[in-house]
Amino acid sequence: MKIKKLLALGMAALTLVAFSAGCGKTDTTKQELPKKVVIGLDDTFAPMGFRNDKGELVGFDIDMAKEAAKRAGMEVEFKPIDWDSKEAELKSKHIDILWNGLTILEERKDKILFSDPYMADHQMIVVRADSPISNFDDLKGKIVGTQQASTADFYFQKPENKQKVKEVKFYGDFVNAFVDLELGRVDALIVDEIMAGYTLTQKQGFKMVDSGLPKDNVGVGFRIEDTALRDKINTVLAEMKKDGTADKIATKWFGNANLISK
């Protein structure tokens, strides 16, 4: 009888351990997709997401996100945020998605779950039209500006890269950065090609120079645990590429579809 009781107690203990272990795991196959998603963005980042003359949010990523949400059967809301605090906004659930020319970086993958790449980008140098700067080496001894928490910010966080210039000034957005460039407070800006190209069609007195830095992949950002939502958006993005919708939206905003990842 004692042996039977000990065996019964042992089996009960094993069952309790197995149950406890199972409770600590998230079954991603049972995640429910939300009926509404809130997308966080920098609303000064033209042409990805910005305000037009009427104050309306427009842009390439706005159109992409609206179409993706429609196909996924979700309502979508856009929420301007401080781009420097994007990871905190995501984690605190003030927003559900980051969709605003977000570069896929290894340094971000511990805080952000990325979609598959949907477009390519490249960091460019923007200078005044009369500047002699023609490549990255010419930035030696110069004051360079860029946006906080941007791809270029991560680049200059490495001491060996920061030493290549005299000083790096960081801005909350590129609107103020371009003002300082025009006034001569900085000698050059490191800007995403997609934004630099668009801005130079709207502003006079600047030129764009190849930085020689590697090309970037752009993706959509989610909370680490939201794998089902990420997978759904991946499926929808693949459909939009295949049926030509992504190309049409790119042509509308960039004049061509060259930046869309195939």
Image (cartoon, rainbow, N blue to C red):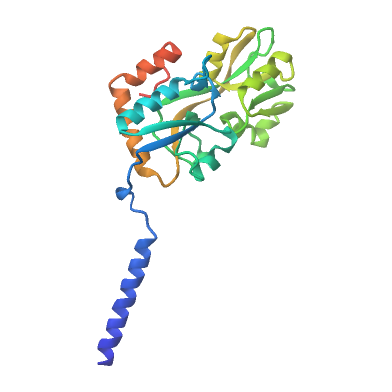
- Residue 38: x %, y % from top left: 44, 35
Whether residue 62 is visible to the viewer of this picture, yes or no, is yes
In the figure, is residue 65 to the left or right of 138?
left
Outermost residue toward the front?
54
Taking depth in this image into account, of 63 and 52 the one nearest to the observer is: 52
Whether residue 111 is visible to the viewer of this picture, yes or no, is no
Q: Residue at x 28, y 87 (%)?
A: 5
Say if 75 sits above or below 29 in the image: above
Q: Quadrant of the C terminus?
A: top left
Say if 1 sits above or below 110 in the image: below
Q: Quadrant of the N terminus?
A: bottom left
Q: Residue at x 59, y 14 (%)?
A: 209
In the figure, is residue 150 to the left or right of 131?
left
- Residue 52: x %, y % from top left: 51, 16
- Residue 20: x %, y % from top left: 37, 67
Taking depth in this image into account, of 95 and 199 the one nearest to the observer is: 95
Q: Residue at x 75, y 22 (%)?
A: 141
Q: Residue at x 30, y 29 (%)?
A: 71
